[in-house]
Image (cartoon, rainbow, N blue to C red):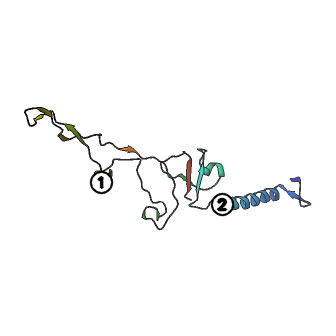
Amino acid sequence: MTLPVVVTGQMMSAANWNAWVVDNMNYLLGKVDALFPVGSILISVSPTNPGTSLGFGTWAAFGTGRTLVGIDTGQTEFDVVEETGGAKTHTLSTAEMPAHTHNVSLPNSSSSVAAGGTSVPSMATSSYATSSAGSGGAHNNLQPYIVVYMWKRTA
């Protein structure tokens, strides 16, 4: 059966039409596929796997619970692609706390005897250390963030 479809001035059979459509779809899919080669990261606010929405490729969730940082070969924390690090919370060690003291000076309650037998209050003080403050728990260590879906093309 010949379909009455005119392409560039020629009549096409159903088989030729189907072949033309398939060839052109494959061409277009190849161009779109080249936009997202294996290893590409796609960031979206849609939860739909890109393999479904784009119609090609195998995609896996990427970077779950982490922020992205650009590679910097001059810093050991950021010199390898897909290297991970950091912590959601962190308990400060003594070495990480600022140098400080907790001393309190209080006047003595004693009095002294001056010449002539007059009792004069003492101006001497005693220094006392305060008790330990804080519970040593971890503190929040999250930078400002916004949550998105990240996908990595794996095949």
Is label 2 in a helix, a strand or a loop? helix
Work out whether 76 lies above or below 41. below
How far apart in space, not on screen, are marks 1 and 2 (Cα)?
Answer: 49 Å
Q: Nearer the viewer, residue 65 or 52?
A: 65
Relative side of 4 to 69, left or right: right
Percent position (x, y) of residue 106?
21, 37
From the image, tell me which residue sits under label 1: 95
Percent position (x, y) of residue 119?
11, 31
Say how many tags the image has. Answer: 2
| The image quarter in which residue 132 lies | top left
Decide: few, some or many residues near mark 2? Use Cα within 10 Å; few <14, some 14-19, many ≥20: few
Percent position (x, y) of residue 98?
33, 51
Amino acid type at circle 1 is Ala
Relative side of 32 to 77, left or right: right
| The image quarter in which residue 126 lies | top left
Amino acid type at circle 2 is Leu
Relative side of 93 to 2, left or right: left
Decide: few, some or many residues near mark 1? Use Cα within 10 Å; few <14, some 14-19, many ≥20: few
From the image, tell me which residue sits under label 2: 35
Is label 1 in a helix, a strand or a loop? helix
Label 1 vs 2, first from the N-terminus: 2
What residue is shown at x 40% (from left), y 50% (from top)? Answer: 87
Percent position (x, y) of residue 101?
27, 47
Mark number, residue 155: none
